[in-house]
Amino acid sequence: MSAIWIPKRLVEIKLVNAAAVDKVSFIRHCEFEYESRIYAAAKEIMASGKRIVMLTGPSASGKTTTSNKIAEKIRTMGKKAQVLSMDNFFKNPEVYPRLADGTKDYENVQAVDIELMEKCLNEILETGKSVMPAFDFKTERRVENAITMDIGDGIIIVEGIHALNPAVLGNLSREQVFTIYAGLREEYSHQGQRVLPTRDIRMVRRMIRDFKHRGHSPEKTIAMWQSVCDGEDKYIKPFKPNADLLLDTSFSYEILVMNSALKNLSAGLKDGSPESERLEKLIRVFNNCDFIPEGYLLSNSMLKEFYC
């Protein structure tokens, strides 16, 4: 199957501000476009007849909620579908691979217990069910036998940064695997100059999510971001051309919601630190954006993965 990828769009911030004069209509338009892409992905999967979907994308590309939305759409089409996060197969930190400076290499595919994951997926193909671990991000420990999955002859969607890595796919039957790469395709400019590349948007998404849901400070997210990007370049993006389907997870109105959430995170950073300077630079860019409060997000929006 040939993958179709939409070229990146460079949009002037003032045009986003103008579109957001009617906040409700603008949000609904952007959400409709995203939901249309979800519907198209579900149709492709159903047409393939495959039972395992491997969905990847760089950090904070919306993999988790996108996977769940695809599963929900497949269920409306009459097929059982469940989502499994590859994060649940992370090894305990004492056996993580290490970077040259001795710190844990969280982005390395060898941080995942590939053998156990393949065993569980093959059990699902053979019997329709399996018992799997869960990973606690606050303690950074794995809890064994925490998830029981029973989908019969349905479809399992496995989401994670290494889902397209040949080291993961190697022992799975390609006749049973459909692959998806999810990523942002919209960037933003001010007075003709690109000021918000997709990586900056994803960093802010992750910073907000990690602060709200994983107990991480903004400083920690910013400090580790370069390592995250290096890992993407090494372990994720090289396999994008192998995807059966490439899925856009951008929302034009998001930068206005991001503007509302971002300033609340700056208070705890030490003045003069590299992380504080990076955040202040971003805030200066976002000063060109209008505001959409988080309360405007639709109840079923993918963006609630990050902002609520």
Image: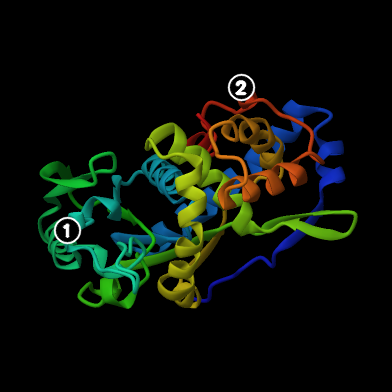
Residue drawn at point x = 83 percent, y = 38 percent? 17
Q: How is the image coloured?
A: rainbow
Query: Do tag 2 and tag 1 residues touch (Cβ < 8 Å)?
Result: no
Q: Which residue is mark 2?
A: 295
For the residues labelled 2 and 1, the Cα–Cα distance comes to 41 Å
First along the sequence among labels 2 and 1: 1
Count of marks, rendered view: 2
Name the foreground residue: 119 vs 283: 283
Q: Which residue is mark 1?
A: 94
Q: Position of residue 188 (x, y in %)?
A: 76, 54
Residue drawn at point x = 66 percent, y = 40 percent? 254
Q: Position of residue 263 (x, y in %)?
A: 65, 33
Residue drawn at point x = 50 percent, y = 65 percent? 229
Q: Is residue 104 left or right of residue 261?
A: left
Give the answer, above or below, for where 130 lies relative to 146.
below
Q: Position of residue 303 (x, y in %)?
A: 55, 38
Name the foreground residue: 54 vs 271: 271
> Which label lies toward us, 2 or 1?
1
**Given the image, on which type of amino acid does mark 1 rest?**
Glu
* Residue found at the very far front of the displayed protein: 272
Which of the 4 image quarters holds residue 76? top left
